[in-house]
Amino acid sequence: MFTGIVEEIGEVTTYTPNDPLSKNGTTLTITLPSTSSLLSDCNLGDSIAVNGVCLTVTSFTLSPSAQFTVGIAPETLRLTNLGSLRPGSRVNLERAVRADTRMGGHFVQGHVDTVAEIIKITPDGEALTFRFRPKNREVLKYVIWKGFIALDGTSLTVTAVNDDEGWWEVMLIAYTQERVVVAGKKVGETVNVEVDMTAKYVEKSLRGYLEGLLGGSGSSEAGQGEEGAQKGKGLLEKIVEGIVKKQGSA
């Protein structure tokens, strides 16, 4: 579990696809700034979010420079943009939270839902507004105005969303721009997206109940069960949207 508050920006030192000398498949080694304390309490097997993707530390060293290596599974490469990383790429880093951690962002699992393309960047004083279009538009049902979203592992607030056109926006203030990699990306580049998991839990909990309630009447007429299930799904989505919207505006 993570918070979406980036602790450090690291630099990719090596990216080795399907490393034949490793049991970890594709491997990624990341070097930290000389002032970083990210690995001060590191142990093998620890979880570190790399651009919002929860990965396992397979080796690390503190000298002559602090760096660590992670393995990336094929499924992770298919669902995220980690396959586009190369030596010199900068990445957001965050250690898994402890029980006494301040929750400055929101609950982030490090499990990416989809990637999104930057389609517009608009300056607004010292701030920058980024507009994103997701590869999988299904995630838009979980994205609401003032709701939480994690982009490359950064906890951000949605400032605008357009379901019909299929995009949402976030604003990066000057302070944030200096501390996350998203600010340095250009139109056409992508980010890893994890939507607020609260909405997904609510949806899963209610879907079976509502579909059963509206579609499981025991009627023998063909199509009534399916029709009821569709009504239940539509009602469920409205309920989920209302709950998440209320939480986001609290």
Image (spheres, rainbow, N blue to C red):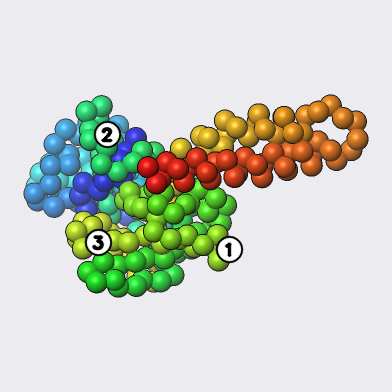
Q: Which residue, as the protein is rendered here, is positioned at the far right?
A: 221
Residue 90: give its label: none
At label 2, which amino acid type do we have? Val
Residue 185, by quadrant, is: bottom left
- Disc 3 or disc 2, which is closer to the eye? 3
- Residue at the spot 66% in from the left edge and 29% down from the top edge: 209
**Quarter of the image with the N terminus in it:** top left
- Residue at the spot 13% in from the left edge and 52% down from the top edge: 33
User: Relative to 154, does residue 85 appear above or below in the rendering?
Assistant: below
Task: Identify which residue, 219 or 113, lies in the foreground.
Answer: 219
Q: Identify the secondary structure beneath mark 2.
A: loop
Could you classify mark 2 by the number of other residues whose Cα lies within 10 Å: few (under 14), some (14-19), or many (20 or more)?
some
Q: Is residue 48 visible?
A: no
* Residue 26 x %, y %: 39, 48
* Residue beneath disc 2: 97
Residue 173: give its label: 3
* Residue 57 x %, y %: 29, 38
Which is more N-terminal, label 2 or label 1? Answer: 2
Residue 171, by quadrant, is: bottom left
